[in-house]
Image: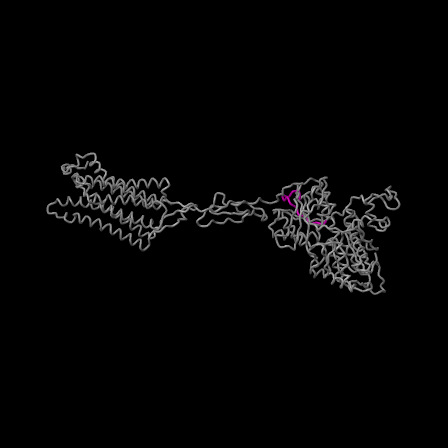
Amino acid sequence: MDGDFVIGGVFSIHHYMHTVKHNYTSMPEPLRCTGSMDSRELRVSRAMIFAIEEINNSMELLPGIRLGYQIHDSCASVPVAMQVAFQLTNGLHPVFDTGEKCSQSGMVTAIVGESGSTPSISMSRIIGPFNIPQVSHFATCACLSDKQQYPSFFRTIPSDQFQADALAKLVKHFGWTWIGAVRSDSDYGNNGMASFLHAARKEGICVEYSESFYRTHPRSRIRRVADVIRRSTAMVVVAFAASGDMRILLEELARQPSPPRQWIGSEAWLTDPDMLRFSFCAGAIGFGIQQSVIPGLRDFLLDLTPAEVAGSQQLTEFWEGAFNCRLGKGTDTGERVCDGTEDIQKLQSPYTDTSQLRIDNMVYKAVYAIAHAIHNLVCQESNSTTQCDRFTKIEPTQVQGQLKRVNFSRNGYPVSFDANGDPVATYELVNWQRSESGSMEFVTVGHYDASLPAGQEFRMNRNLTWAEGGTQVPVSVCSESCPPGTRKVLQRRRPVCCYDCIPCPEGEISSTTDSPDCFPCPEEFWSNAERNICFPKPVEFLSFHEVLGIILATFSVGGACLAIVTATVFFRHRASAIVRANNSELSFLLLFALTLCFLSSLTFIGPPSEWSCMLRHTAFGISFVLCISCVLGKTLVVLMAFRATLPGSNVMKWFGPAQQRMTVLSFTIIQALICTLWLVLNPPFPIKNLTTYKERIILECALGSAIGFWAVLGYIGLLAVFCFVLAVLARKLPDNFNEAKLITFSMLIFCAVWITFIPAYVSSPGKFTVAVEIFAILASSFGLILCIFAPKCFIILFRPEKNTKKHMMSKNEVCN
């Protein structure tokens, strides 16, 4: 249609170009389209005419100005699109008169189209040098946002960069990390998939396969792609493909039953009503352009007069294909002639389906954007009236400049372009669901707005249907998630999403799902059996509440009571011969020291503290030295008593009671000095032993100074050995009051216990170290009290007839 300003339109009404063989001897045949017609694209082209006629009838936009149009079918082919671009640039004249100067009189003011990215790229490279603005309604390749290469390109549909990011976030949102990918082998598919894979990698998504195909490829190539999808383990398939390409692939998949797949689609095919016939794709999900309402469009589409249909080659082809008849006269093939009874109102076709106006609105907005740009150049506002000059000469460069600044709303839909010629990216989340009647339909289940803050782009408002009509989100992972308590170990030569789950070692945990590492627990904590929580290590020490502690404490108290009972017996029979004959003063002092020894073992039981650590070693060291000193005094008295009977011997004057007390006090003071130096310089202190056992804490006393500890034990051992030697020397002395044999035996037990104690103490772990030390104290103490005092108490209590001076002075070899 002619007009004051002409807008070009390019649409992929057909999907194939007739192949022409050139012989270079004659003029080539004109390029022409072939194959079936895309009714949706025909409807979109008609939406452009509707918008232009609506503008022509408007008194607000371009009043008095008539817009014209030239609409072409590109056959979704680059050669045809290039030819169309040249025609729109130079006019419709097939041959130019070489005598005329080339002018721009044949140029269109702007171009709406093309539907595909690859044809749009080719067109933009041709018309770009002429600065003719091109506003595409469906070319989404992100590459077209490059203003260095495509300075005159605009579009009303968002760039695939936004869709690719949105698809990656959608896949991540549902936990799918193992997917397949197929794409059109075109600029649209290759660039879109490249953007998606880049975004998917950042989201931690792995791709099992990535296959490309094109509708003109041989069937063997399409079959190979279909077989890859069938054999794959990925449940989810992301398809970035044009509608015509996807139709070929799905037809191939329909030939042979395939395992259920969850399809994730790009807008190009997911919202094409013609694709709903592939029922095995039920549950498919993806993004679509927002639905719109264009008042009057449906009536315009259905108001086709016979003359209008007959005057358009495309409408004629559509009419004849829809009603299976021939317009005009019949042919020899016997086809039915259209008789006028055909009712387009009852026709079920993508052309008549206006329930999902998506691309139509993009064309509608593109036409209005161009009209607003022209309006700003040829019209002036004055006194609330608009005056437009239809004879104003405008250059495409001016229209391009005005398009950059347009900002208006139409039917509630805003229209503007950013610096790259792109609109604000908003999508509907579309799901293929079965209606109550069993047919497939598009259902909007949410929205995506790229302008919102990160993490808030998605808004879902309805439940989704998944593959094969399922209600549960399908699982598509290479490896199941590693639960807390394990870590991921990548499988060799596999993608990062394929891994094994290895349990964390002892003392380490992982508290999150799919943790790449196990983390050691803090020093005083340990892992539970599931390796997902650190809990405080159990604290271990020899307690009064456990069986071992109770037994040792019982023996300790029992030993102290035994010493007290023995002292009571000796005190009540202190005037008896056997008590008086065995140095009663040293005996009582020895019993007192043994009581202290028994009670000192109690300081080893219970949680260590600063005072208990210092007390336990010093108390037992001093009390034992007091014991050994008393026994040593007894031994010296026995030994010196017999030497005093020798003629001329005056040795007993050096071993009287005062000397005995001084000897015991001297030996004890030396030990007290050693303990004092130990406590002053480097005393024992409580520590938490974290090395002996990894899974529990041992509360124990550190020695502080090891020299001090071994000096205390060494001094005890030195006195014990000295006492043992003297007792051995006196063991065969006569008379019944001679207790050297008993002392010898007690010292033998004492030394054996403490010699055995050293390796047992060093090798015993944890609380058993303390138990060994207590056992050594109790064993040596019981050895002393039983060997030295038990025979005497037996005589005092049960053999009183032997507890006489006469019996004591008899020459028996042993004390019975």
Q: Relative to 741, is 547 on the left or the right?
A: right
**Residue 258 locus on image (x, y percent):** 67, 41
Most extreme residue toward the right is 329
Instruction: Tell me the quarter of the image containing the C terminus.
Output: top left
**Residue 385 locus on image (x, y percent):** 79, 62
Residue 234 inside the magenta-drawn segment: yes
**Residue 343 locus on image (x, y percent):** 83, 44
Q: Looking at the image, can residue 138 be seen?
A: yes
Residue sitting nearer the eye, 76 or 472? 472
Residue sitting nearer the eye, 320 or 573? 573
Q: Looking at the image, can residue 183 be seen?
A: no
Count how many numbered circles sit on residues in the image: 0
Most extreme residue toward the front is 383
Q: What range of the chain is rendered magenta? A: 228-242
**Residue 514 locus on image (x, y percent):** 55, 47
Residue sitting nearer the eye, 619 or 238? 619
Residue sitting nearer the eye, 803 or 389? 389
Q: Relative to 687, is 48 on the left or the right?
A: right
Q: Relative to 619, is 430 on the left or the right?
A: right
Residue 90 inside the magenta-drawn segment: no
Most extreme residue toward the left is 648
Instruction: Tell me the quarter of the image containing the N terminus.
Output: bottom right
What color scheme is it?
A: one colour
